[in-house]
Image (tube, rainbow, N blue to C red):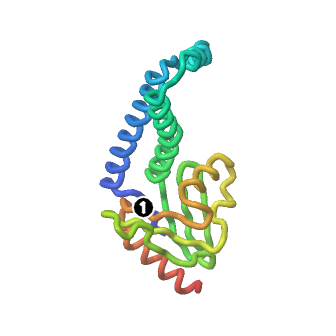
Amino acid sequence: MKTYRLSPAGRRTSLVLLVGALLIWTFALWSFASTLKLTYNPTQFWSSLQASLDAGLGVGQVVPALLMLVLIVATPLLIWNLLEEWSAAYTPDDDGLHFESLGIVIFCPWSAVTGIRSADEDGDEPLDEILFNQDATAHIANPLLRFLHRQAYGRRRLPVYAGLEDRADLLSAIRQHTVVAV
């Protein structure tokens, strides 16, 4: 059976997005610390935070700090999603669809696939989702990997990334087996 992975162009796009996300995360960490006058030294962090709070925080500090805090939390999740996309591998066979990425192994029999839908009608690049009638993530053994995958895609969906090589062939194979299963 053929395994579908990101094309070289898809890998380049993911790499550019990954570098951009790392730059944003670095900027957010720096900006958060400089806005609140904090140090990230573990022995001095709490004392610098206490000194900043004792000095009083104005709106000009609180609003940017909250925005940077959101970026500090959300950007690693984006980085995880980009890394999962980078290493994604789809393998359709006679029994079902196999998906592997960064320690995540999902197998869904064709009877569990309910269809394919476009996830972003207005986007420049196609993004489709494979829909399942059951929790496709239940067999991910590692609870952290299961949580990260679920937060990105949900329990009953699996993305078909825009940068996949021979993407149309993969979608065709899935549709062919889905019609047979239904």
Q: Is residue 69 above or below residue 167?
A: above
Name the secondary structure under disc 1.
loop
Residue 154 locus on image (x, y percent): 59, 61
Label 1: few (<14), some or many (≥20) within 10 Å? some
Residue 46 locus on image (x, y percent): 62, 18
Q: Is residue 114 above or below residue 83?
A: below
The residue located at (64%, 60%) in the rendering is 137
Residue 42 seen in render = no
Q: Quadrant of the C terminus?
A: bottom right
Q: Is residue 57 above or below residue 76?
A: above
Most foreground residue, 143 or 89:
143
The answer to whether residue 178 is left or right of residue 126 is: right
Most foreground residue, 173 or 25:
25
Number of numbered callouts drawn: 1
Residue 131 seen in render = yes
The residue located at (42%, 61%) in the rendering is 161
Most foreground residue, 49 or 45:
49
Q: Is residue 118 above or below residue 18?
A: below
Residue 95 locus on image (x, y percent): 60, 75
The residue located at (42%, 31%) in the rendering is 26
Most foreground residue, 72 or 152:
72
Quarter-of-image position of residue 60: top left
The answer to whether residue 67 is left or right of residue 17 is: right
Q: Say what amino acid the circle numbered 1 marks.
A: Tyr
The residue located at (62%, 49%) in the rendering is 145
Quarter-of-image position of residue 15: top left
Residue 52 locus on image (x, y percent): 54, 18
What residue sits right under mark 1 in the picture? 161
